[in-house]
Amino acid sequence: MTQGIARRFQISTLAAHLVLIGFTLLALAPTLLVIMNSFKPRKEIFGAPLALPSFETITLIGYDTVLKRGDILHYFQNSLIVTVCALFFIILFGAMAAFALSEYRFPGNRLIGLFLVMGIMVPIRLGTVGILKLMVSLGLANTLFALILVYTAQGLPMAVFVMSEFMRQVSDDLKNAARVDGLSEYTILFRLVLPVVRPAIATIAVFTMVPIWNDLWFPLVLAPGESTRTMTLGAQSFIGQFITDWNAVLAALTLAIVPMLILYLMFSRQLIRGITAGAVK
Amino acid sequence: MATSAQRKPIRWHIGVLLAPAILIYTVIMLLPVFDSLRMSLYGKGPDGAPMFVGLANYTTLLTDSYWQGPFWNALWNNVVFFIIHMLVQNPIGILLAALLSLGKLPGREFYRTALFLPTMLSFVIVGFVWKLILSPAWGVSKTLLGSVGLGSWFAPWLGQPDTALITLALISVWQFIGLPMMLIYAAMIAIPDELMEAASCDGVTGINQFFKIKLPLIWPSIGVVSILTFVGNFNAFDLIYVSQGALAGPNFSTDILGTLLYRTFFGNQLQSGDPFMGATIAGAMFLIILCGVCVYLYGVQRRLAYYQM
């Protein structure tokens, strides 16, 4: 009897593994296929697309074309500047507002909180027409700063919401002891409270970083110029130019995938913990 | 006490702390959204200056022979896009979450990481990768299908008007399957073990256990996933733009509201840009998303039963 249960259990575990392996293959195969073929000569890309690149024929000709022609490094740098600066402002301004809302009682507190958090439900893209007008009138069209401002605005509502939830849980005794010691409110926020809410900061960083790095819409609309092109927009226009040169297209795609892949493998633990903790809370 | 009768000193730091967030959020996000909505009530006057026209633009969008065709087409395609996500992405997401949360399944961290990977890639990468894979010129998918004896099934799915939209929706499902999976997985591992043990003792096991106990407990998460899918789908643009271009070919069969908005506002080979009609389409999208959110908040969320665990 117990043996029967154990066997049934094993069969169901096996079935679960089979289904999961199937979907895992489906999730990984397209990316692997592109990376693999980017190292093959043209004949093999078409002749044997599913084979691994062999040592005799391995080639970097696609990478050569791409790196000679395009400013991939420059695009990469632009994306990095935009993402890091936006993230910095989101966390700084978000923490400041969240601290004010969660720490002090003042008239209009709840109203301001609602006003800020409402933005989670308003898709900023629908304001594109107005944002473009605004940026042009401020002389910021085709600058990275315009992108940083837009992404900061887009990320703030979520940041304020998540951080004020976390900040409410920081012990009052700690803060009051600091006040007795004569620390200013700013010192309390930056020296005491921020280090305590590090998990919230990690969650926000991971959640806002990916959409900013991957966004195509605002770079296309606000900063399409060559000097301000982000990685995503650069890859898009770049691959378009090479559409018949398969070596170059596959190499360009690989170059666009690899940074994201490395970042993901480095932070996947935090990311997954962030999602699961956020949902359980 | 004397001190409490005195007026408290103005706490300047509250203002200083709030000001940057409120300023940036209001100026860069809220005002432009409202400005766009306001602009949808204006049109080009006889002297070229903007002129208030009330709801005339919306009437034009819904009834004018030049506009109504593309608008209803894009809206319908968007609805199809959303339905495919709800029917394919969410059930598979629930299935994967259920499998991952089965006891102590070895290797589940690996599965989790791998299945979430496509979500991290940009639309540009996803669009091009699939375009290459499905391209008849490369023939990878034909070879793959051929190896399981289904070679004759292959067709240039992205190039045919009647399959392009479904193919794109499935590509998008492929990319985002990780999100419902993770959110529902989080809800499932929050279910206390004692509850499941008690169920097992009462003879509720296997599939029954899933439908009778786990599913009712995760309905709120499924609700959240659905509204996220809705807002995401009705804002979608990137994937279609990357793989089919601004004209959302073939023959507009993959045109959704996002691409229609882009084309209308910035113009394209077929027409010059029209900021007023662009704003009108943005306004329509805003109303649709608002309706969806309201249906969720008042129709769905209130009826859900929340269990304290």
Image (cartoon, coloured by chain):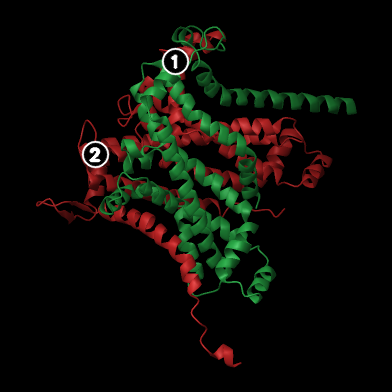
Q: Quadrant of the N terminus of chain B?
A: bottom right
Q: Secondary structure at mark 1?
A: helix
Residue depicted at x 22% and y 45%: B60
The residue where tag 1 is placed is A61
**SS for dot 2:** helix
Q: Amino acid at mark 2?
A: Trp
What letter labels the chain drawn in green? A
On whether disc 1 and disc 2 are found on a single subunit, the reply is no
Query: For chain B, what colour was chosen?
Result: red
Residue B132 placed where, x, y %?
44, 19
The amino acid type, in three-letter code, at marker 1 is Ile
Q: What residue is shown at x 35% (from left), y 40% (from top)?
A: A228
Residue on which disc 2 sits = B67
Label 1 chain ID: A
- For this view, does B44 lie left or right of residue B136? left
Q: Does the residue at mark 1 contact the one at mark 2 (Cβ under 8 Å)?
A: no
> Is there any visible trace of residue B305 in the rendered image?
no
From this view, report whether residue A168 is shown above or below residue B117: below
* Vertical arrangement, residue B296 with respect to residue B149, above or below: below
Left or right side of B22 for B47: left
Q: Report in which chain the residue with disc 2 lies.
A: B
Inter-mark Cα distance, 1 to 2: 48 Å
| Number of the front mark, 1 or 2 | 1
